[in-house]
């Protein structure tokens, strides 16, 4: 597999704050990546570094084999849609879609038009008069219709209602199937996008704490439910990610089980439930926080 | 480098710069329409004032009124306004263009080219208005707005002086906007404090070395056209400094 992005030892410090802390990872070609993490975890800074919008304090970034900073041959193939993207105030949506094809050589005008209809975007309204959701829709449409070989979506859905968000996920997936490209989607609505993602990067306090295939990650934990003695006996000395108990019943999330262990659990009268990506990440993030505290 | 497939070939180096030029006039309202409308309103207001003066003054005084109007400052506003246009244009299109994968270098070159084009367009327009003003004896009222003394004596001088003045204000605007984009309000405050120190320091230097006479002589010797030609040096310094300031700017919210 070819890597589109290679990052090693990347650090970005602002006055007193380390927004990205010694990050090392790579992004493979034609896959959908989820860049997940809590607010302020460093997602936007990381994407700004990858797109040459910000400058690294330390470390190496290689995108399409080169540094992205002030590098037109790299940046021409990147579309970066930020939740906070600013548009010229006097622009109407039509001005954005008129200028976008000049900058994105893969721009598909028909697709853009279809998306404009899907999102019911008023083309003639001034952007400063638009609702938050409509402004977000402009970004989503640019990001999809630009069909850039490397597309970043940074929390693109702010103000979009559930229907519009679903439209975004559906169009992204359908268009991705026809025109494979590398997509990095940053979000904190993890469960909504979990079916889209092929690979997951979790960033917490500037550190990459999970860098795993989505499928592997989903299988990496299971919740065991049953009577408390039976659950305790089965769990034994395994690593426990989470524990809930009501009366005589217990529900314990533990790290992945082999096929044989699953059989054993079923034989012991226990129920096995899958763990959602969101729960998994919340739990892993908490664990790591405790680890950090222990080290400090 | 990984092979990248695109439907159309990506823009060439020149094409990328021209794309930024187009971006500045995608919505020509603020950069072209509003300045001309302001110019039109200034002209109408002056026509009204001249009309009032003429109807109130004795016929014998008309010649001296016409001489007095040679120092009208009505049209100077348009030059200062272009500085505002430059600052506005950069502060809104810079984060937008970077979101479209434009490099800072291409952005700045395209912006400089766009402003030079606007300077040329407005200079030609003002030169034509000056010619009309001459031909109609000051819009039929003996008024002077575009042919005032400090714009030169003939159309070639006027065209040059207008163009140099527009470039001066555009480049100062570009430098100020770059400072704003990179350091926001703190940068602008520091810039004006620095500028104040330089101006006061320069004035002090001229005073203590008894050089005010020489300073005045410099402009007298250079003449009107020569002085405006020297302003291009300041414009070049401002334009180039702006580039190095913007080169390290990050689009912020």
Image (cartoon, grey):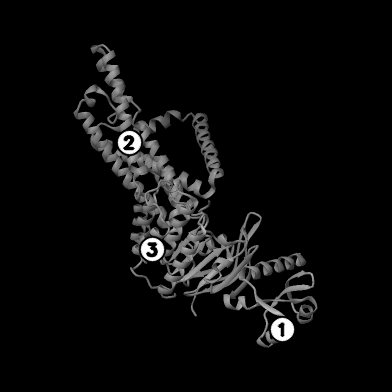
Res. A109 in view: yes
CB atoms of marks 2 and 1 within 8 Å: no
How far apart are the two marked residues, 2 and 1, measured between alpha carbons?
80 Å
Task: Tell me the distance, in whole angstroms, between the alpha carbons under discs 3 and 1.
Answer: 54 Å
> Label 1 belongs to which residue?
A265
Seen as rendered, the residue at the extreme bottom is A260
Name of the residue lying farthest toward the left: B135
Q: Earlier in the sequence, mark 3 or mark 1?
A: 3
Q: Please report the residue visible at 61 percent of the width from the left and 58 percent of the height from the top.
A: A39
Q: Residues within 10 Å of mark 1 (few under 14, many from 20)?
A: many
- In depth, the one of A42 and A270 nearer the eye is A270
According to the image, label 2 marks what residue?
B37
Nearer the observer, B49 or A243: A243
Residue in front for this viewpoint, B200 or B102: B102
Side (left or right) of A291 relative to B162: right
> B201 or B146: which is nearer to us?
B146
Q: Position of residue A153 (x, y in %)?
A: 50, 63
One can see residue A59 in this view? no
What chain is tagged by disc 2? B
Looking at the image, residue A257 sits to the left or right of residue A214; the answer is right
Q: Nearer the viewer, mark 2 or mark 1?
A: 1
Are the residues flagged by discs 2 and 1 from a single subunit? no
Mark 2 lies on a secondary structure that is helix
Quadrant for the C terminus of chain A in the image:
bottom right
Placement of B1 over or under B159, stated as above or below = below
**Chain that bears disc 3:** A
Instruction: Say whether residue A53 is left or right of residue B161.
Output: right
**Label 3, on which residue?**
A104
Real-space CA distance between mark 3 and mark 2, rounded to the nearest whole angstrom: 34 Å
The answer to whether marks 3 and 1 mark residues whose Cβ atoms lie closer than 8 Å is no
Of badges 3 and 1, the one in the foreground is 1
A38 vs B87: above or below? below
């Amino acid at each position: 597999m070819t890597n589109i992005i290679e990052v090693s030892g990347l650090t970005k410090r602002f006055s007193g704050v380390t927004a990205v802390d010694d990050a090392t990872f790579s992004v493979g070609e034609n896959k959908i990546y989820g860049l997940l993490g809590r607010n302020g975890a460093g997602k936007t800074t990381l994407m700004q570094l990858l797109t040459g919008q910000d400058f690294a304090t330390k470390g190496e970034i290689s995108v399409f084999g080169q540094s992205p900073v002030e590098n037109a041959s790299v940046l021409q193939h990147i579309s970066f849609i930020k939740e906070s993207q600013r548009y010229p105030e006097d622009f109407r949506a039509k001005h954005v879609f008129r200028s976008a094809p000049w900058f994105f050589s893969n721009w598909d005008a028909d697709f853009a038009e279809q998306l404009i209809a899907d999102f019911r975007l008023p083309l003639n309204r001034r952007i400063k008069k638009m609702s938050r959701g409509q402004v977000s829709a402009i970004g989503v449409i640019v990001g999809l219709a630009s069909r850039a070989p490397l597309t970043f979506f940074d929390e693109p859905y702010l103000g979009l209602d559930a229907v519009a968000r679903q439209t975004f996920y559906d169009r992204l997936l359908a268009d991705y199937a026809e025109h494979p490209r590398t997509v990095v989607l940053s979000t904190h609505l993890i469960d909504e996008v979990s079916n889209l993602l092929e690979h997951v990067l979790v960033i917490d306090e500037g550190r990459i704490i999970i860098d795993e295939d989505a499928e592997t990650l989903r299988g990496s934990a299971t919740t065991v439910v049953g009577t408390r003695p039976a659950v305790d006996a089965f769990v034994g000395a395994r690593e426990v990610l989470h524990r809930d108990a009501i009366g005589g019943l217990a529900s314990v999330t533990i790290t992945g089980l082999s096929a044989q262990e699953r059989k054993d659990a079923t034989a012991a009268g226990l129920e096995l439930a899958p763990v959602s990506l969101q729960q998994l990440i919340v739990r892993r993030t908490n664990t790591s926080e405790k680890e950090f505290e222990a080290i400090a | 480098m990984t092979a990248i497939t695109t439907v159309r070939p990506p823009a060439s180096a020149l094409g990328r710069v021209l794309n930024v030029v187009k971006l500045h006039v995608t919505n020509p309202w603020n950069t072209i329409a509003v300045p001309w409308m302001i110019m039109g309103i200034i002209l109408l207001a002056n026509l009204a004032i001249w009309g009032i003066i003429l109807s109130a003054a004795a016929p014998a005084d008309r010649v001296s009124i016409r001489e007095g109007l040679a120092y009208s400052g009505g049209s100077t506003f348009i030059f200062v306004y272009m500085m505002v246009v430059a600052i506005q244009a950069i502060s809104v299109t810079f984060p937008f263009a970077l979101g479209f994968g434009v490099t800072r270098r291409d952005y700045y070159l395209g912006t400089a080219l766009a402003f030079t084009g606007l300077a040329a367009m407005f200079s030609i327009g003002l030169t034509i208005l000056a010619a009309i003003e001459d031909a109609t004896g000051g819009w039929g009222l003996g008024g002077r707005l575009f042919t005032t003394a400090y714009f030169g004596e003939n159309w070639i001088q006027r065209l040059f002086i207008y163009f140099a003045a527009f470039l001066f204000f555009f480049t100062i605007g570009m430098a100020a906007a770059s400072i704003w984009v990179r350091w926001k309000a703190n940068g602008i405050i520091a810039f004006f404090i620095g500028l104040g120190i330089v101006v006061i320091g320069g004035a002090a230097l001229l005073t203590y070395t008894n050089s005010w006479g020489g300073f005045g002589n410099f402009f007298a010797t250079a003449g009107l056209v020569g002085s405006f030609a020297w302003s291009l040096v300041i414009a070049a310094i401002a334009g180039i400094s702006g580039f190095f300031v913007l080169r390290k700017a990050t689009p912020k919210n």
